[in-house]
Image (tube, grey):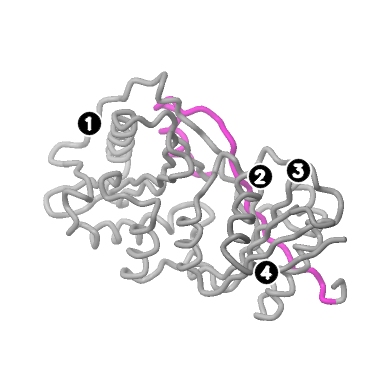
Amino acid sequence: MIEVFPYADEADEQRGLDVYNAVWPHDRVGLDEVRAYRASLRDYVDLLARIDGTMAGFALAAIAPQWPERAFALVTVLPELRGRGTGTALYEAVSAWAHERSLGVLETIVADNDPESLAFAKRRSFTEDVHELGVSLDLRQTEPPIAKPPEDVEIVTWAERPELARGMYEVVLEAIPDIPGAEQEQIEPFEEWLEHDMRGPRDRPEATFVAVAGDEVIGYAKFSLSSAQPTTAHHDLTGVKRSWRGRGVARALKATQIAWAKAHGYQELRTTNEERNAPIRRLNQELGYRPSTGRIFLKGPPASPTGW
């Protein structure tokens, strides 16, 4: 028998996180990070699924402020328990949640090395929307490149210059719309962006690097650091203002990040980039990053109410 039910307590939180981390080992997270993510959402539900009393799956349905017209749905089933109806039961449950909120589109995500999950989504009329290719850099075998910003450009940490936050936000306003697949993303107002994107448990001012020309912030790059992955640092946004692109600012920021991560004992850097984002993909390749697990975003319909 399959049971699907919402979280009841902290023990259920941990059970859901254990399922997620088992299926997404390259993107493990901790409870503090999950809770911070929930706090950034407009609405959400967390669900667990059991088969004959055995924990088998987890699902999340959420409305993010950046995409209020759709529901993000993540259905995760332990590999050894797939093919027994758990994924379908969770999909129907998140679909019901979306229908109750008059949302007719679901967005989901699968790892690009998980053909089983991709096939599950496509059988339910989901189509590929965005493919982010994964790359990683082994810092144990890497000598950090020299950071050479353009003349009169200085790279500092946000910890050193906390007053630069507003200028970093101005970079976001130019950079996000130019990322393939993110053209329609709604950027939160400054204070919300600062709280949700820059002050979470994975964000550290000393691991956020800002390129400054005079008094102007022209670009920045930040890491996302998880206590669940103490030797791996994930690249977050690397953004440069349009008028400064093609002049070596992004390269200097990345080189600074590599040097910082190696000096602070990290063994690996990871990131994903939309496959159409040729400039950053080319830069990563030149800096020695090699292919690793990526992710595929898909859009599709909620299950028909008649199927419940």
Q: Badges 4 and 1: C-beta atoms under 8 Å apart?
A: no
- The residue that label 4 is drawn on is 6
How much space separates mark 3 and mark 2, taking CA atoms?
7 Å
- The residue that label 1 is drawn on is 148
Disc number lying in front (2 or 4) = 4
Amino acid beneath label 2:
Val
Amino acid beneath label 1:
Lys
Q: Position of residue 73 (x, y in %)?
A: 65, 62
Which type of secondary structure does the marked residue at label 4 adopt?
Answer: strand
How much space separates mark 2 and mark 4, taking CA atoms?
20 Å
Disc number lying in front (3 or 4) = 4
Q: Is residue 298 magenta?
A: yes
For residue 128, above or below residue 192: above
Q: Position of residue 291 (x, y in %)?
A: 55, 30
Instruction: Specify which label sits upstream in the sequence, 4 or 1.
Output: 4
Which type of secondary structure does the marked residue at label 1 adopt?
Answer: loop
Which type of secondary structure does the marked residue at label 3 adopt?
Answer: helix
Left or right: where 183 falls relative to 47: left
Instruction: Specify which label sits upstream in the sequence, 2 or 4.
Output: 4
- The residue that label 3 is drawn on is 79
Q: Which quadrant, please, contains the C terminus?
A: bottom right
- The residue that label 2 is drawn on is 23
Instruction: Specify which label sits upstream in the sequence, 3 or 2.
Output: 2
